[in-house]
Amino acid sequence: MSPMGEQGGTVSTFPLQLDIDGDTLASCVACGMCLPHCPTYRVTGEESASPRGRIALMRDVAERGEADAAFVEFMDACIQCRGCETACPAGVRYGHMMEITREALAAQTRYQPRLRRLAYRVLGMPRLLGFGSRLLGLSQRLGLMRVLSLLGRVRPFRQLDAMTASLPRVPVRQAPLTASGDDVWLFTGCVMDAWMRDTHRAVQSVIEATGAGVALPPAGAACCGSLHLHAGLASDTRRLARKVMAALPGDTPILIDSAGCGATMKEYGHLLGTEEARRFAARVQDVHEWLAARVDELPANDAVAPDAGGPGAGSGAQRPRIAVQDPCHLRHVQQAHLPVRTVLSRFFDVVELDDDGLCCGAGGAYSQQHPDVAAAVRERKVAAIERTGTSVVASANPGCTLHLRAVGLDVRHPLEIVAEHLKGAGD
Amino acid sequence: MASEDDSADAALLAGLRGVLGERARDNDFERGLYSRDGSIEGSPPAIVCLPETAVEVAEIVRICRRHGRPFLARGSGTGLAGGAVPVGRPVVVATAKMDRIVEVDTGNRVAWVEPGVLNLDLSRALTPLGFHFAPDPSSQQVCSIGGNIANNSGGPHCLAYGVTTAHIAALEVVLPSGETTTLGGVEAEPAGLDLRGLFVGSEGTMGIATKAAVRLTPNAPSVRTLLLDFDDVSEGSAAVSAIIAAGLVPSALEMMDQRAIEIVEAFAHAGYPTEAAAVLLVELDGLPGGVEAGVEIVREVALKHHVGHVRVAADDEERALLWKGRKNAFGAVARIKPDYYLHDTVVPRSRLTEVLEQVYRIADAYDLIAVNVFHAGDGNLHPILAFDRREPGVDERVKAAGRDIVAASIEAGGVLSGEHGIGLEKRDYMGMLFSAHDMYTQDVVREAFDPDGFANPLKVIPTGSRCSDSFHQHVPEGAWV
């Protein structure tokens, strides 16, 4: 559980230039209000796994111009949920500092090994990603993953075991989506389209239920670059961002159904620093934000038969109860978690978790790279969900959904739940 | 010298590793992280220990003794008086991993908890049972029960409910000798001297609490929160005394000045009136009839003191938002300057106005910014001096201003600390309040627990308060005292 791992022996340092400006580094007064809102501090109780601690370490490295392996581990152990930013009374831009740190590590050290860089690159190649995903799905069905897992016991492939164990079951075949108009773009992304296209299908049907037509992005808008940004590969993100922007010209709103993608695409202006990027970013909305402004255009709840399908549908006035798990990049980064409730509460009784939006441990690729910490963080989330006594959980991010499903929870995208409910009403 | 230190540290580390494995740390980064708390002081420990059980804590203490090394306990590291700042390369015993609520005993109305349990987590866990833990420091969401015990912490609601010592029934502690014992008891009146009462507030100088029986306070059936704004600070502070004089004891009675209102509003967006000179946050709880009558009394008193508006929070959400602002005020100071020095003195309520004026004058004289947000109901001032430590010479100005504020408070009939403790920050001011005999007596009491000065040495009681050859506190060579 320790982020430190083994210790002892001589500590070897290496030069590291961390270009975080002095005012930003000084903006943390170390009051500690962030600690309980940091998932890694929560499960370790260690300063080095807290935002306050990490900022102090960044300050130290920025001043000394050198770091060591321990520093890299401490920085790598951050899930980048940014729950600390919501909690911070001083408005410290922690996420920004962590992105600069990761970028410096990736550029100046072997923080991101070549194999991992290649894996990230595949995310921007839809055909290769699709092919690989089908292969993965097939392997899972043929029991080949067991072989990989066994291989993982051998030293050079040690990580494979945990990785294969935490992968979701990937579909082999998915029907294509069909465009229905040009009122909005529905951004489909990389892994989500390859693994969870049915979620897009449900989202599209809810958008269409308001009477709007949905355009689907051309191949150029393959990946938003979010995972790259978190890994310190910001130049890859910028390259992908330019492709996405070129593929989605005009003024049409761009709707996102993955909180992580939306958070990154809203940052394109800051990332690229151009007027064009700022204009593009202003068109980006989480799909719930767009729907919340048009919630009256969705079918009224009383049109839904009381005995209609949908989770927990009861009789009479009893509305089904749905627990909402806020993806961090929706709640803490985009601050767009309330619209999810606006949409859901048209049809359901929304049940809140009592954990102040603490991260679930998914963190994009984090749960693959730090399975132990991710699982420990998830335990807290599972307990919070259990305390609600609600069996169906809505979560608007594919990473959280997969991570929580892996322990047997019924987690779905909020609009999948709505789509199913509407379908039940229409039958 | 350095190599001697290093080999002594290495032997100590080997001993601690034998108990804790990799949870005994000596790398520079982590020693740096545990070198400071929420105050402005800092110096690194030799080793950081992260125990998970009381047995491990006792082992750590015994190993430290064998190696002649002092130790100090640390909770969440939010203390504001430097109580958890290591002095003289001690071993830090961080209790954050000991965070279990062991047993909730509603029959005796106590809960047994480990010291690393966070204050707000405890109250939240008790909510479904209809109870809470009454002391609620501003850092409630992050401060630990162990830290609350060490500092005898207060909080806005301690005006009516009393500070931490009133809410601790019993303590399991590891004494500086390494023995484990229980002080106090859950029964109504434990026999003998109240050693529990002595331990609470001793700032880690009498041992390390490893488990506490905290008292459960029933949640009030009715709560009302009012926000009163004033054009004049003195009208606001006069209203504080007048509310108490009218026979009310609100559960909380807080004051913020204009600068505090501005920074708090920027964070919380609670609708605090940023143009007001001062606001009072008044909370009343109890049975609905009594609470409503209290609201009217507060309203009448406030009107006599030329209140601008009387805002009564409509629901729990609005109440929570108002408190969110108040409880994050200190951290939010970073919106003005990156560092702050927060004082904690208590003055008689009737002298609030004049001491506040003095605080502003002192800050002006040292070219510093003073922000005031405090527990007005019990006269507990919290003047915040905001500064940027990168400005040359500012440290000296801040410390001098702090000293003047303490002197002014004591002159007005006040005391050194309301709830943050003495720690390192106010240790050397003890002589302003206590006679040499007073301090000698306090040191004799401390010595009864820790004759060899192993537990959080060089804190609270100034060195030299006793004849040096009978004063056994460990003073390592080169230590900063």
Image (spheres, coloured by chain):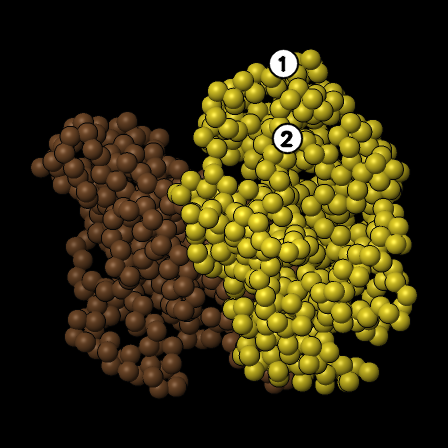
Residue under the image location 34 percent in, 72 percent down: A163
User: Chain A appears what colour?
Assistant: brown
User: Chain B appears what colour?
Assistant: yellow
Query: What is the quadrant of residue B471 in the picture?
Result: bottom right
Residue under the image location 84 percent in, 40 percent down: B410
Element assignment for label 2: strand
Q: Chain of mark 2?
A: B
Which residue has dot 2 on it? B253
A259 in relation to B467, above or below: above
Residue under the image location 75 percent in, 55 percent down: B423
Earlier-in-chain disc, 2 versus 1: 2
Indicate the position of residue A382 as horizontal and vertical percent values.
34, 55
Query: What is the quadrant of residue B76 in the picture?
Result: bottom right
Mark 2–mark 1 Cα distance, whole angstroms, equals 16 Å
Can you say which quadrant of the picture contains the C terminus of chain B?
A: bottom right
Label total for image: 2
Residue contact between numbered discs 2 and 1, judged by CB atoms under 8 Å: no
Can you say which quadrant of the picture contains the N terminus of chain B?
A: bottom right
A142 in relation to B404, above or below: below
Residue under the image location 28 percent in, 82 percent down: A150
Residue toward you, A307 or A318: A318
Indicate the position of residue B283 as horizontal and vertical percent values.
57, 29
B383 in relation to A265, above or below: above
- Amino acid type at image mark 2: Leu
- Amino acid type at image mark 1: Glu
Which residue has dot 1 on it? B300
Density class for disc 2 (Cα within 10 Å; few <14, some 14-19, many ≥20) is: many
Density class for disc 1 (Cα within 10 Å; few <14, some 14-19, many ≥20) is: some
